[in-house]
Every structure is written in structure tokens, then in C-alpha cells.
Image (tube, grey):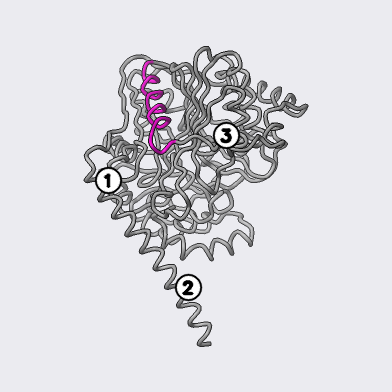
Amino acid sequence: MRIVKKIVLGALGGILAVYLLFALGLTVLEWIVRENVTVEKSLEAHSTEPHSLTHFDQGAASFSRRLELIDSAKQSIALEFFIYDVDEAARILTQALIRKARGGVRVRILVDFSAPVFQLKPAYARVLGEAGVAVRYYNTSAVYRLVSVQHRSHRKLLIIDGETVLTGGRNIANDYFDLSDHYNFLDSDLEVSGPIVKTVLESFDVYWNSRLATDPATEGSPNAEAATFVLPNDRDRVVLEKLSAAGEAYRQSHTTHECRDLRFVTDFPNHGEASRHVFNAIVEELGRATKEAVVESPYFVIKSGGYAVLEDLHKRGVHVRVLTNSLASTDASYAVAALYPWIGSLADTGLTLFAYSGKPSRGQSTDVGGGGGRWGVHSKRGVIDGTTTLLGTYNMDPRSANLNSELMFVCRGQPALAAEVLTSIAAREAMSGRVIERGTIVRRAALLGDSRLTQRLRFLLEMPIANLFDFLL
């Protein structure tokens, strides 16, 4: 028993030591950045000029639109993503990019170097480079640099000719476009055309040219797998036909909206609070709320600052409605583990909380990839008072607030767009379990949903760690 006790105490001591190391490191780093007067402000823009906005809440249609936009490019294509996989979706998209590059269009891809998800390795970058597509990596800090490696670019952008941008929660991978047979995301994008896109492109250039962006290693030659990656096959043609049909059906059932009060805000490529702007912009927009705020976020991990915002909204009589994932639908069980013990505290803020079931949503899920498997919400969007729509890359968690670089669009005074987004969220709520209803806990177990036994066991094991390290989630 003494040996077991020593092992347990040693493990707990190690966890505490790592926690203190992270906390101290982040604190010191924050202090340094605050004192560094050379830290630049993020690029932000507000326009009252007319802009065209189209909302996409279906993966297949969103992918089809990406391919159409790429095909329409005449001068430049800029892509920035947290994840750029080397699967079927990435291969089809990459083939389209190569065709444009060979036709004289300038094509650039900036992808984050986060070790757990990084796939577009130098061998692939060299194949792309030979075809005229430039690739850079964001923040290649070594894993042992425990503080600096935590900062990631979570931004997601496709910019065409500096005139049109498509942004939202989707990365480049099968899971985001209904192409996986085991797990797919229900996500959202916003296509924006108009003068403000110039600022979005300028923000891309800031990241592309930042000290944190580096070129891939050039030594060695492309391997056979990388070379095959850019070659079309018979299945690609079948998938492209299905994507085109989904895109056309979506276009017939949805409309483009005009926004004359549009805001773009992004974080700056750096660590620390001085470079974080999106969280403050969200708080500012919520400060204008008078009746209702509806929010969808795949991860809902609230810290003191978030509770302060929720409590202020409650005191002002603003009802907050939140849709997030259950254990049955999430791709990150540790986020549910960090949320579960705090249901009571959340209920005290008077909000309503839904947890998604994990099943497909009619009209928003397609079977272009064969169907089946689990579905989880991944949108980062919200609607305030039925007239203001917020959509971007920001998750309601400490990582987006404190560590990641994010971006967001805010369209004010556009009830038609807001109604479309609210209808989309309501359809997902209909496939969800109600955990809290206006401050009353209805069914705590809805946060677990119909999760498997193995998921629940992992959830229980993760709960103490997730709550100890919730500032990194």
C-alpha cells in the first residue's frame, strides 16, 4: 500500500508541477507582452457600404461553393487553416488550386503547425510548390517549448481576388464536408463580398509575413504518397458530381443577403492579451443585447470572464440560449468533462443549454461520403436580438479567448440573415437534449446523451484533469 500511495502522490505532484509551470509561464509571457510597446493592434474594419453575405450550414454545399470560388479566381487565392488534411476533401480541393496556379493565379496556403492535427508535411508542400502553390507553416515551435507552442492560429479563410472571402468553422478535411463515414461536423460558413474583404486579405498578409510563419523544409524529394495526393481518381469524379448537385439544391433554397453595417475583427499573430481582440468584440456586441442572445459553440468551457458576461446579461433581462455538444456528439470529450461539474453554476446565470444528440440533422446533413457515423455541431455563430449575426472561428472556451488567434464577422441590422441563422440553430436544437431551461436544470444526463460505455469511462477519467487544466482547453 505504501508503494501505491507513493505512486499516487507522485503522480498528483507531477500534475500539480506541470500545472504550475504552465500557469507561471503564461503569466510571465502575458506580462512581457503587455510591456512590449511594439505589439501591433489587430486589423479591424467596419463598413456601411453594401456587402453580399451568404450563409452555409451544410458541408457538401459549402465544399461545392469553395470549388466554384476557386474556379472563378483570376488573380489570387489565399487560404489559411488550422487543419489542412491529406484526405479526399483536401485532395479534391488541392487539385483545383493546382489547376489555377498553373493557369497563372497566385495561390498561397498558410496552415497551422499544431502537432496533434498537422498533416500537410514538407513532402506535400514540395509537390504543391512544384505546381506553383506556395505553402507556409504557422508557429513551428518545438513541443518542449511549453508556453509558446500553445499559441495557434485557429483562423480559417478562403479569399478570392481580394474581393470575396469564405470563412467560418470549417477546416479542410472530410469531417467538415459530409465526406466521412464515421464522424461529420455540422458547421457554418459565411461568404462575404465587398470592400471589407480588402482588410481580410491584409490580415492574411500580416500572418503570412509574420515572424511566426516559416517555409517548409526543402531537403529531400517528394515521396510517392505525396505525389499521388494531387492525382485525380475515379471516386473523385463521383464525389464531385454529388457535391455539385448538393450545391445547386442549396442555392435554390437559400438566398444572399445585403449587409450595410458589417464589422470584421481578428486577433493579431502573437501571444498574450494585447493581441486578443475577438473576445472583447463579442463582449462588446453582447453589451448591446436587450432581449435575447442565441449562441452555438462546439465547446462550452466558461471561466470567470465568461461568467461575468453571462451574469451581466441575466441581470439586464437578456435570455441566453446555448447549443453545444453532448458526450455522444463531441470530438473532444475533455470539453464535456470540463463543463459537466459546472452545470449548477451555469444554471445560476439563467441561461438555457442544449446538448446535441449526435444524429444527422435533416436538411443540413448529406450522405455524399456514404453517410452513417456520428454528427457533432462545430459552428461558431450567434444571433443577438434577432437582428445581429456573429459568425467566425471563435469557440466559447479559454483557448480561443487566451491562446488562439481567431476572427469574426458581425452583421448588424439584418433580420433576414439573422432569421436564417436562428432557423438553422433551431433545427439543431430539435435534435438535442435540453440540459438547462432558463436557469433550471432539466436533465443533467442530456449532456452525456446516448454515448457509449467506453466514452463515459474516458469522460470520467478525463474530468479531474480537464478541470485542472481547463485554461488550456
Q: Nearer the viewer, mark 2 or mark 1?
A: 1
Closer to the chain start, of discs 3 and 2, is 2
Badge 1 density bin: few <14, some 14–19, many ≥20, Cα 10 Å: some
Q: Position of residue 241 (x, y in %)?
A: 71, 22
In terms of secondary structure, what is the magenta stretch mainly? Answer: helix
In front: 266, or 99?
99
Residue 457, picture quadrant: bottom right
Are discs 2 and 1 less than 8 Å apart at CB? no
Q: Which residue is mark 3?
A: 172
Of residues 361 and 127, the one drawn nearer to the viewer in this rendering = 127
- Do the CB atoms of the residues marked 3 and 2 lie less than 8 Å apart? no
Q: What residue type is disc 3 on?
A: Ile
Q: Residue furthest right?
A: 234
User: In percent of the image, x 31 and y 17: which residue is there?
Assistant: 48
135 vs 450, left or right, is left
Q: Could you say whether the residue bearing mark 1 is in a helix, strand or loop?
A: helix
The percent position of residue 78, horizontal first and vertical second, equals 49, 24
Instruction: Work out whether residue 8 or residue 352 is closer to the camera in this orientation and state it.
Output: 8
Three-letter amino acid code of the residue under disc 1: Val
Q: Earlier in the sequence, mark 2 or mark 1?
A: 2
Residue 285 tag number: none
Of labels 3 and 1, the one closer to you: 1
Residue 180 picture location, percent across and down: 67, 39
Under mark 2, the amino acid is: Ala
Per the rendered image, the range of residues in magenta is: 195-213
Query: Mark 1 and mark 3 in contact (Cβ < 8 Å)?
Result: no
Q: Quadrant of residue 449?
A: bottom right
Q: Residues within 10 Å of mark 2 (few under 14, many from 20)?
A: few
- Residue beneath disc 1: 33
Provide residue 72's location: percent of width, then percent of height: 56, 14
- Secondary element at image label 2: helix
Q: Which residue is mark 2?
A: 11
